[in-house]
Image (spheres, coloured by chain):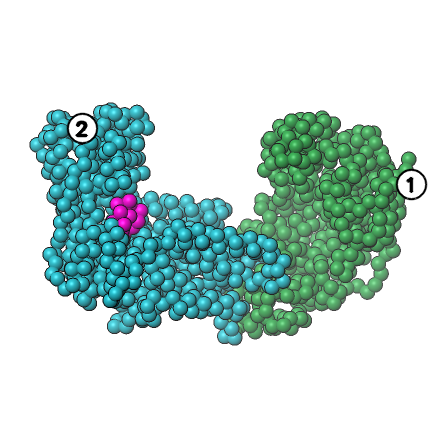
């Protein structure tokens, strides 16, 4: 059977960064086709191009032999290609019916008036297909994630989707819901639909799909039937050659334990009831860098954010320098000597309207003020010293932070916390969106901090970086620790396997060695 | 101290806007009034209260919030302060501290609702606004707390206000600047220090700029937010104390709508409503800008409706100007720009057409005499009639030019208008005062400077005026009472709907009526203060109808009130079994009601407009006038 959807030489750039390069593959009717790759391999970008979200790309798409260029997701949907995003695109306060027909009300009868009857008829068919029986008008926020996901799929089916693209559909589902979804996908496959599927979970890859496509660094590596690719071969394909090069880390003396984390649990901030971080325990010593590895949805970011009190409902015990942390709140953590570099500096780090200096000193004002009165001379002096130490490129400490490059902005947030002189520094993806030169400077800084006796816990979206910096690497999968490797045992294959849930690894629980 | 504020440009823009307004004032200078120093100190005096509110509002807006409750807290504070000083005779410092403390309590409620319980600031402070207004009315019993103390026989005696009142409402130690202006400058300075020199100010900016980033940096977001709302409310309480001192009373309605002016000041100054950007200097400039706009409109006697429209347009332009639109963006949006400009212009043109006052008489031979007329409000039809009577009487004399100003029922605005007349050296003043106490000083000043002052309808204190023209409300009320006594049997059940009982006419119509029905064996089963307003009368009557199965006669202190009562009765089908009588008998109102059978009788309350013009002419000719002129009155009785 000729492929329904063909992609030829797809390329995409975001500014100077190439995210996809000459990717070609195809999707056949009646198949379940899974796309895998490490963080940043380009999977989501590719799916968004296929579903019409990104309209600016190189290369061609063909549907049923006819070359197309989608102008919008609606356009793609009309050609039969619909995507269910990981974060779902439902309006929480609207009911199932309104959500399904959102933006497409015109297609059902009279243009200006809502055609309720026609809508119900069409939606009824779709929902019956999925075995779903819900009240049309109840706001969808009252339904579970699994039901909401099915409503999204119904949305696609109601408009005759031929290719259904699912981005990490099982990340928010429990075991029974996953089974139900898989049965549904099998039955859709029998109807002749094509399912395109992104996932990180090894067990799913080998249970359901017919073919696998591997992406790495924006390039298409291979497309094979599942039976033709073993696990090890798959992982090798995802990693490519082993990255070799000088270690980024300068060894230094390891001192006493500074951070003890016991049984920390973080509930899902989206309210699904699941635990994003499930009873994680570890310890970090002075001068040590502990890396937390994991793929999207593994809980590594939430672990750091939760420890610092950035997410609600965190439980567990934490000791910093032997003192029990009273509550999980940023103010309390700061007092205890912990610092957090958040992974989204725009949303959680920088105050865009404030100057560089003010952003830098925000966490350390107590030390620079006398009874509430800011000693501005001290503030300026500290700021200048720190800017020098970080090699910050700026046009005046009083100018706006928004004018700095990404790398320099990241340095400002780092400076903020360094000024508070922490004992434990949590770094959540510190080099994300940062240019090469700034990255080197951040590595240098990490080495400086550890040499001064700081304990560092960090995540990174680039496993090679983590391997270069960390003394030990903990791997998380679905909120649990699935691997713990000291530096010399931490090969890329081992880390990726543990991150995908392959449990047959030694030293499952973290030890303080 | 390298820079006073990080970004100079918003301040320059605010300064440019202010300069533009001052320039407009120089052009439309109302016969040179704009250049008199009194005009400026007067403007500062008026706007300083709003400036104090705006300082607190600036702080709140910087944190990304809003405080709608400041007007109500001002009213509550005015009432409490007056109560503490005038009725309970507390020492001034105790009264001030307690009042500020009440403000702090109000602010902490708003703050906790917003910060701890995560209500949207708009909603939390809206609720606080309504609640505080209710509290003000509860504490004051719905009446103004004033130096007027009600004695046993229902008359009022006037005590002396405590010296703190004179201190707060007067000028500063021999200079020309008013104390309230000094307070405003002090408050602004303190707020500036807090924003720029203290840790808490830095935290406020961070919270407004990116609350999540601030929280994750260890900023105690909840306590900082509560603090800012407390400060805003305390400043509102301070403004309330100043207002009470100015008005010589605690008015539970004081401050209504002030929060919008405060917000407008902050916005025009250039602080960003979204939070994170702004400053006290900007607010200072915004205060002066709004102050001058209002003063220029007032000096030029621009009518109220037009004034509101102009202010709205100014706010729009000021904000657009602040937005720093680049030429390219403007051109791209030109379709919408043209559309908006057209709509605004149409609106202004329609308003001008509708509101255009008739030319005050052709330019005659000889000198034109300018008469300033300040009407306490144009909400009551009777007062609209009064202005109409004055206009018609003045038209007959081409050398008389009357400038009408509407005080919008605000005693302080009316005071400013008298000051403006005095400053412009008009030839005569006609005034229908809102309240006796706050208006007596400016009227006395005008009178003592040689300007003849005709006082209409409501009295002022003392005798520093040329003549007081009124109808005799006592006699009219008594006539109504006697008519009722002659036409109704023993045991008649009466509902009395009273006008604003803190004003003399209502008191007199009440006591006159009671005298008229003495001995007739009538029973007053229900009485309520409907404040001269028809909707209020209707509501009160509805309550009466619900409570009493039998009502024979309704006596309302004015025809709108009687009409409102009639509507309430008709809504429950009882209008045929009740008789309604009122006072005013305006040709297009009360007299029509009588003809239609809605009112059994209406007793004329002449406006005195015609007599006022006659008195002005006599005074200008140098003839002497009696101190009080009582107007005659007729009764309009319906067929039965």
The residue under label 1 is A228
Residue A416 forms part of the magenta stretch? no
Residue sitting at x 28%, y 37% = B537
Q: Residue furthest front?
A: B365
Residue sitting at x 27%, y 53% = B391
Residue B183 numbered mark, or none = none
Asked if residue B475 lies left or right of residue A334, the reply is left
* Marks 2/1: CA–CA distance: 103 Å
The residue under label 2 is B493
Give the color of chain A as drawn: green
Q: Is residue B202 above or below residue B176?
A: above
Q: Position of residue A466 (x, y in %)?
A: 75, 57
**What type of secondary structure mainly makes up the magenta span?**
helix
Closer to the camera in the image, A104 or B563: B563
Residue sitting at x 26%, y 47% = B385
Q: Position of residue A289 (x, y in %)?
A: 71, 59
Q: Position of residue B280 (x, y in %)?
A: 45, 65
Q: Which residues are magenta?
A: B376-388
């Amino acid at each position: 059977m000729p492929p329904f959807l063909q992609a030829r030489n797809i390329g995409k750039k975001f500014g100077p960064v190439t995210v996809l390069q000459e990717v070609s593959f195809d999707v056949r009717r009646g198949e379940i086709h899974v796309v895998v790759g490490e963080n940043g391999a380009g999977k989501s970008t590719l799916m968004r191009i296929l579903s019409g979200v990104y309209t600016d790309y190189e290369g061609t798409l063909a549907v049923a032999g006819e070359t197309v260029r989608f102008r919008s997701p609606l356009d793609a949907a009309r050609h039969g290609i619909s995507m269910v995003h990981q974060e779902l695109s439902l309006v929480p306060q609207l009911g199932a019916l309104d959500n399904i027909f959102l933006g497409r009300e015109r297609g059902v009868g009279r243009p200006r008036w809502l055609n309720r009857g026609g809508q119900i008829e069409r939606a009824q068919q779709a929902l019956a297909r999925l075995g779903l029986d819900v009240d049309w008008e109840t706001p969808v926020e009252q339904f579970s994630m699994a039901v909401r996901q099915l409503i999204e799929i119904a949305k696609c089916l109601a408009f005759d989707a031929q290719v259904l693209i699912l981005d990490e559909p099982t990340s928010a589902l429990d075991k029974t819901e996953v089974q139900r979804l898989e049965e549904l996908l099998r039955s859709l496959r029998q109807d002749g639909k094509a399912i395109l599927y992104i996932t990180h979970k090894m067990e799913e890859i080998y249970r359901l799909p017919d073919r696998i496509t591997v992406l790495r660094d924006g390039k298409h590596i291979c497309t094979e039937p599942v039976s033709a690719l073993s696990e090890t071969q798959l992982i090798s394909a995802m990693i490519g050659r082993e990255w070799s090069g000088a270690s980024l880390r300068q060894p230094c003396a390891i001192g006493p334990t500074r951070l003890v984390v016991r049984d920390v649990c973080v509930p899902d901030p989206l309210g699904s009831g699941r635990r994003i971080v499930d009873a994680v325990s570890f310890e970090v010593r002075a001068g040590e860098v502990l890396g937390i590895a994991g793929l999207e949805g593994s809980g590594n970011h939430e672990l750091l954010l939760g420890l610092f009190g950035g997410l609600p409902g965190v439980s567990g015990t934490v000791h910093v320098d032997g003192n029990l942390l009273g509550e999980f709140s940023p103010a309390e953590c700061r007092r205890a000597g912990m610092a957090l570099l958040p992974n989204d500096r725009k949303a959680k780090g920088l105050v865009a309207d404030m100057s560089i200096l003010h952003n830098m000193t925000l966490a350390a004002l107590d030390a620079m003020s006398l009874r509430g009165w800011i000693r501005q001379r001290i503030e300026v002096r500290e700021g200048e010293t720190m800017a020098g130490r970080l090699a910050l490129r700026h046009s005046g400490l009083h100018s706006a932070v928004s004018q700095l490059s990404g790398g320099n902005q990241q340095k400002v947030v780092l400076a903020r916390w360094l000024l508070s002189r922490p004992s434990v520094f949590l770094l959540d993806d510190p080099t994300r969106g940062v240019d090469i030169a700034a990255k080197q400077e951040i590595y240098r800084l990490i080495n400086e901090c550890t040499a001064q006796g700081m304990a560092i816990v960090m995540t990174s979206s680039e496993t090679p970086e983590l391997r270069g910096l960390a003394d030990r690497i903990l791997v998380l999968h679905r909120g649990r620790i699935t691997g713990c490797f000291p530096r010399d045992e931490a090969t890329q294959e081992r880390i990726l396997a543990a991150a995908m849930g392959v449990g047959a690894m030694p030293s499952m629980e973290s030890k303080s060695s | 101290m390298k820079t006073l504020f990080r970004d100079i440009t918003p301040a320059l823009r605010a300064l440019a806007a202010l300069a533009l307004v001052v320039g407009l004032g120089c052009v439309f200078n109302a016969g040179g009034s704009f250049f008199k120093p009194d005009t400026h100190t007067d403007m500062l005096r008026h706007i300083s209260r709003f400036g104090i509110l705006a300082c607190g509002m600036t702080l709140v807006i910087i944190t990304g919030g809003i405080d709608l409750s400041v007007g109500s807290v001002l009213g509550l504070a005015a009432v409490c302060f007056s109560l503490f000083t005038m009725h309970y005779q507390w020492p001034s410092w105790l009264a001030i501290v307690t009042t500020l403390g009440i403000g702090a309590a109000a602010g902490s409620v708003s703050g906790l609702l917003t910060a701890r319980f995560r209500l949207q600031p708009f909603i939390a402070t809206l609720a606080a606004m309504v609640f505080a207004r209710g509290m003000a009315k509860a504490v004051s019993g719905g009446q103004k707390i004033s130096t007027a103390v009600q004695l046993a026989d229902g008359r009022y005696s006037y005590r002396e206000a405590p010296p703190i009142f004179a201190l707060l409402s007067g000028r500063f130690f021999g200079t020309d600047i008013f104390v309230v202006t000094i307070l405003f400058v002090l408050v602004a300075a303190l707020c500036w220090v807090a924003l720029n020199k203290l840790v808490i100010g830095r935290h406020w900016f961070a919270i407004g700029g990116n609350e999540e980033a601030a929280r994750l940096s260890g900023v105690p977001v909840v306590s900082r937010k509560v603090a800012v709302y407390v400060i805003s409310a305390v400043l509102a309480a301070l403004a309330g104390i100043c207002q009470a001192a100015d008005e010589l009373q605690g008015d539970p309605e004081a401050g209504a709508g002030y929060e919008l002016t405060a917000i407008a000041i902050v916005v025009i100054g250039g602080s960003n409503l979204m939070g994170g950007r702004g400053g006290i200097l900007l607010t200072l400039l915004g205060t002066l800008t709004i102050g001058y706009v209002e003063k220029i409109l007032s000096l030029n006697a621009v009518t109220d409706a037009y004034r509101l429209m102009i202010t709205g347009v100014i706010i729009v332009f000021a904000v657009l100007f602040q937005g720093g639109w680049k030429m390219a963006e403007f051109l791209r949006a030109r379709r919408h720009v043209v559309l908006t400009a057209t709509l605004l212009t149409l609106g202004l043109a329609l308003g001008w057409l509708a509101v255009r006052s008739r030319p005050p008489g052709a330019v005659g031979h000889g000198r034109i005499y300018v008469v300033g007329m300040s009407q306490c409000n144009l909400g009551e039809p009777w007062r609209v009639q009064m202005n109409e009577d004055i206009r018609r009487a003045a038209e007959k004399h081409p050398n008389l030019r009357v400038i009408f100003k509407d005080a919008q029922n605000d005693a302080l605005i009316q005071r400013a208008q008298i000051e403006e007349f005095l400053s412009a050296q008009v030839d005569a003043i006609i005034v229908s005062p809102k309240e006796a106490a706050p208006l007596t000083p400016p009227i006395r000043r005008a009178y003592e400077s040689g300007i003849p002052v005709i006082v209409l309808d409501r009295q002022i204190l003392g005798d520093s005026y040329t003549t007081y023209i009124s109808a005799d409300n006592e006699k009219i009320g008594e006539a109504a009472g006697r008519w009722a006594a002659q036409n109704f049997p023993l045991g008649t059940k009466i509902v009395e709907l009273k006008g604003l009982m803190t004003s003399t006419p209502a008191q007199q119509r009440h006591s006159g009526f009671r005298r008229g029905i003495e001995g007739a064996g009538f029973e007053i089963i229900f009485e309520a203060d409907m404040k001269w307003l028809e909707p209020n009368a209707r509501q009160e009557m509805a309550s009466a109808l619900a409570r009493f199965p039998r009502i024979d006669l309704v006596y309302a202190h004015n025809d709108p009130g009687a009409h409102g009562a009639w509507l309430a009765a008709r809504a429950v089908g009882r209008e045929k079994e009740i008789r309604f009588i009122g006072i005013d008998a305006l040709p297009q109102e009360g007299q029509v009601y009588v003809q239609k059978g809605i009112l059994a009788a209406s007793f004329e309350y002449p406006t005195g407009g015609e007599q006022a013009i006659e008195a002005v002419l006599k005074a200008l000719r140098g003839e002497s006038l009696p101190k009080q002129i009582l107007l005659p009155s007729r009764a309009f009785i319906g067929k039965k």
